[in-house]
Amino acid sequence: MNGETATGPWLALLSAHLAATFYMVGLAWFVQRVHYPLFAGVGAERFAAYQREHVSRTSPVVGPPMLVEAASALALVALPRAFAPPALVWLGIALLIAVWSSTALLQIPRHRDLASGFSASAHRRLVATNWIRTSAWTLRGAVALGLVFSATAAGVR
């Protein structure tokens, strides 16, 4: 926009943010439409062990990308206004807060409820409340794309 160009670090930051966000968008939809609904078919006698294994295997798959997404979202606050609308950056952070809050306040407690065995009501609440994360991550994907398009149009290379 005023002849400025941004290179290297900004492009790397935007790329990392886009990759981490879309990894989580895809994972959120998989979990929402496939993984969580299948919990009901595990069987009561095997469910507690299944749930423990689910938690131990899921953490390393979701933890690092969630941290990259969060760190890069916060770092985008420093992106020059010429390359990204601040409202879009802050919308992305607000959606990230929604994701993390939903995870901490709604999904983790449901997983704890399920740790001792299958509960149809806890399972229903898990699937229902997970739509918050799925929706927020989907919107975050749109925001991340918007940031990349905005920055690219403004000269980030």
Image (spheres, rainbow, N blue to C red):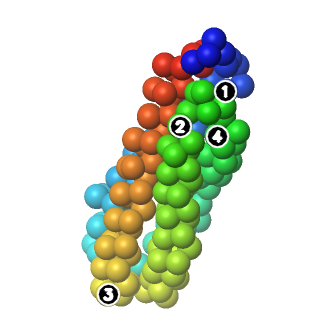
The earlier-in-sequence mark between 1 and 4 is: 1
27, above or below 127, in the image: above
* Foreground tag (3 vs 4): 4
The earlier-in-sequence mark between 1 and 2 is: 1
Question: Which residue is at the front of the view, 44 or 148?
Answer: 148
Question: Horizontal and vertical percent for residue 79?
Answer: 66, 34
Residue at the outermost top position: 3
Q: Residue drawn at (36%, 57%), measured in percent from left and top?
A: 135
* Foreground tag (2 vs 4): 2
73, above or below 94, in the image: above
Q: Which residue is mark 2?
A: 85
**Could you give the CA–CA distance between mark 1 and mark 3, rounded to whole angstroms?**
46 Å
* Foreground tag (1 vs 2): 2
User: Which kind of residue does numbered mark 2 sit on?
Assistant: Pro
Q: Which residue is mark 3?
A: 121
Q: Which residue is mark 4?
A: 76
Q: Using the rendered view, name the quadrant where residue 38 is placed.
A: bottom left
The earlier-in-sequence mark between 3 and 4 is: 4
